[in-house]
Each structure stands twice: as C-alpha cells, then as structure tokens.
Image (tube, rainbow, N blue to C red):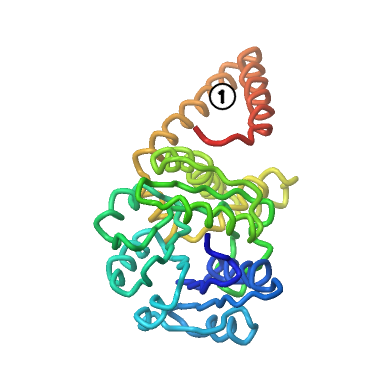
Amino acid sequence: MKNLRDLTYGIVGLGIMGGSIAKAIRQNILSQHGATGKIYACNRSTACLNQALSEGVADKIFTSTEYHKLLPECDVVYVCLYPHATLDFLKENREYFKKGAVVTDISGVKGIFEKQLPQILRDDVDFIIGHPMAGGEKEGYAHSTEKMFLNRNYILCPIPQNKEENLEMMRNFIYEIGFTRITETTCENHDYKIGFTSQLCHVIACSLVDSARDEKITAFGGGSFEDLTRIAMINAPLWTELFISNKEKLVEHIEYFESVVDSFKTAIKNEDSKKLTELMEESREKRLKMGSIRTKAE
C-alpha cells in the first residue's frame, strides 16, 4: 500500500475545504519524520495560492490553465469544486492524470458521479467517491484550518471499479487528517440520507429566516432561533446546485416534513393538549435514540 508520507497531493480548488485539506495533510501527514511528500495546489484566483505558498502549506502552485502541468505529478488528487464543475474537470482533463492516480471529491451529491464516472475516467485512474462531513458558514481559503475535520464523520461510497488497496489507503488518509468515523454506503443511500440530514435542514433554516417579518426579532432571542438558523448563512450558488441535483429525494423529505408540521399546527389550532404532548414526547424519545447511533450505514 502507498505510504501517505511520500505521496504528492494535488488540491484542485483552494477554498475553505481545499485549504483545510491541504493544511491537514501538511500538519498531520507531511510533518512526520522522514516524509518526502508534496502538496501542489491549483485555483482560479491566485491570491489564495500565493498565501498558501508563503505559509508553507503548498510546495508548488498552479493556475486553472495549468492542469496539464499539475495532474501528471500527483498521486492523489482532491477535487474541491462544485458537483457539476467536478464532472467537467474530470472530462476535460482525463488525459493528464498520472497513471495509477487516486482521485476523490468533496461533493454533497453522489448519484451524478456514479452514473457518469464510467464514461469519463480512464481505467488506470481510480476515482473514490467521498464526502467529508465538515465545513463552515464563511467561504474561502482565509477561513480554512487544519482542525476542520477533528472528530467529524466522512462518508465513502465505494463502487465496483475501486481497487481495495486504494480504498484502504483512503481510509487511512481520512483518519490521519482528523476524522474519527467513516460511514460507507451506496451513492443512492448517501443522497437520500444527506437529503434529510443536510439539505432539508438548510431549506428549513432559510425558510425560518425568510418567514421572519421583523429583522429585529433577534432582540428577543434566547438561543433557539440562533441555533436553528446558523446554517442559513449559506453559499447560495453551491446549495442551489445541491438542491436541484438531488431534487427527487429532497422534495420527498420536504413534503413529509410539511405533513409533520401540519400535525403540530392542527393540534395547536384545536387546543388538543393530548395530541400535542404525544407528538413532543415521541420526538424527544426519537431524538434520544438518534444520539446514540454510531453504526455503519445500511
């Protein structure tokens, strides 16, 4: 199996996630005694590249017109772009990847990759579909940190084309940069579950903020509104793409959520104390059970 300390890592897209991955590699893998690996970074704008170079995070930097120079050098390529931009990147640069390279992504939807990868990548390049469950409200390299992934969950979606040795290398890498749990599942199951735990939550948070008819309402806040709406400070173009790419599953979740909210509304409207208490007790018990679940996804 490949030694993580001796690999050349290519980071395509040096925003908050790409920057955090680069910093975590530098801090947790390449700072080890005897490490000979390198980090090469590529980005459309150059300000963050120069910053990464000056900070010692990147060993070499490339612009987005220099993929043909970057990719032949990289053993592992992390594509930190929006989902469809990732697919376009793979299509347009398939000839430049190093033979035997492992390529992976950070996208919040996976079905589109499973469908299109077989027609895109060469047989001698192994694309491992993954989703680091981490991030932040603020964007850009300036907000990246090597601590981003500590004690977080990483989702892997192995496909038949993946080589077991590369999957094992990826698992080791994930733990090395700070993650403490890996969930392995199918792309279909990923999109269904993430549609609920992430995308629906962002829809609810944005809807709650949009429903406020008084922008000074937070003067009466005690923490509940703030906790529920933190994620409404959203990267709108990215989440628009995620919502639409997963629209069937997300709309299903929204419709069921609407039915549950309607049950609460009806009970309140009818002053049905028994039903209302029953609904809240059920939700409390369910949430307590959810908190203890740390098992492999089905």
Q: Position of residue 82 (x, y in %)?
A: 41, 62
Alpha-carbon neighbours of circle 1 within 10 Å: few (<14), some, or many (≥20)? some
Instruction: Give the labeled residue for mark 1.
Output: 264
| Mark count | 1
Q: For numbered disc 1, what is the local secondary structure?
A: helix
User: Which residue, as the protein is rendered here, is positioned at the far top?
Assistant: 274
Q: Nearer the viewer, residue 114 or 192?
A: 114
Q: Amino acid at mark 1?
A: Phe
Q: Nearer the viewer, residue 144 or 200?
A: 144
Q: Residue at 56% of width from left, 83% of height from top?
A: 59
Q: Position of residue 227 (x, y in %)?
A: 67, 47
Q: Nearer the viewer, residue 107 or 58?
A: 58
Above or below residue 63? Residue 107 is: above
User: Which residue, as the protein is rendered here, is positioned at the far left?
Assistant: 119
Residue 34, quarter of picture: bottom right
Q: Residue at 56% of width from left, 24% of height from top?
A: 264
Q: Position of residue 21 (x, y in %)?
A: 57, 66
Q: Is residue 184 left or right of residue 216?
A: left
Q: Is residue 67 left or right of residue 183?
A: left
User: Which residue, as the protein is rendered here, is positioned at the far front?
Assistant: 1
Q: Nearer the viewer, residue 64 or 197?
A: 64
Q: Residue at 63% of width from left, 25% of height from top?
A: 286
Q: Position of residue 214 (x, y in %)?
A: 60, 51
